[in-house]
Amino acid sequence: VKSSGKGVLYSYTTVFRPQRIEFEVPYVVAIVELEEGWHMLSNLIECDLDAVKVGMSVEVSFKKMTEEITLPMFKPA
């Protein structure tokens, strides 16, 4: 489904123990409510932990994790 890649932070949690070595801790696991009305589980990047707030505007940013894996993540808009 096509999306604008823009939305708001619906919910989040901060992770301090990585599940895989590719993830640097701490990181924010986020549920983003996109403009189109559906929700997406992802990560919030490029944002200080103290600045994370439910309802903040975010936009998609694609992050290369390995040579084989690129993930859609979100940053403050």
Image (spheres, helix red, strand yellow):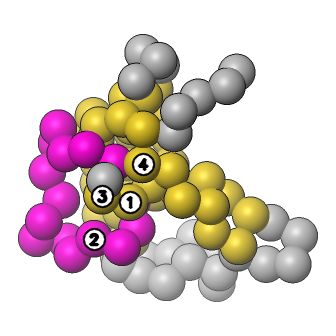
Q: Earlier in the sequence, mark 3 or mark 2?
A: 2
Mark number displayed over residue 75: 1
The reply to whether the C-beta atoms of the residues labelled 3 and 2 are less than 8 Å apart is yes
The reply to whether the C-beta atoms of the residues labelled 1 and 2 are less than 8 Å apart is yes
Q: Please state which amino acid type lies under the numbered disc 2.
A: Cys
Q: Quadrant of residue 74?
A: bottom left
Residue drawn at (42%, 48%), measured in percent from left and top? 59
Residue 32: percent from left, percent from top = 39, 37
The reply to whether the C-beta atoms of the residues labelled 1 and 3 are less than 8 Å apart is yes
Residue 16: percent from left, percent from top = 35, 76
Where the N terminus falls, by quadrant?
A: top right
Residue 53: percent from left, percent from top = 14, 51
The reply to whether the C-beta atoms of the residues labelled 4 and 3 are less than 8 Å apart is yes
SS of the residue under disc 4: strand
SS of the residue under disc 3: strand
Report, in whole angstroms, how far the alpha carbon at label 4 lies from the one at label 2.
12 Å
Q: Which is in the foreground here, disc 4 or disc 2?
A: 4
From the viewer's perspective, is 8 left or right of 17? left
Q: Please state which amino acid type lies under the numbered disc 3.
A: Pro
From the viewer's perspective, is 44 left or right of 42? left
Report, in whole angstroms, how far the alpha carbon at label 1 lies from the one at label 3.
4 Å
Q: Earlier in the sequence, mark 4 or mark 3?
A: 4
Mark number displayed over residue 76: 3
Magenta stretch secondary structure, dominant: loop
Q: Earlier in the sequence, mark 4 or mark 1?
A: 4
The reply to whether the C-beta atoms of the residues labelled 4 and 1 are less than 8 Å apart is yes
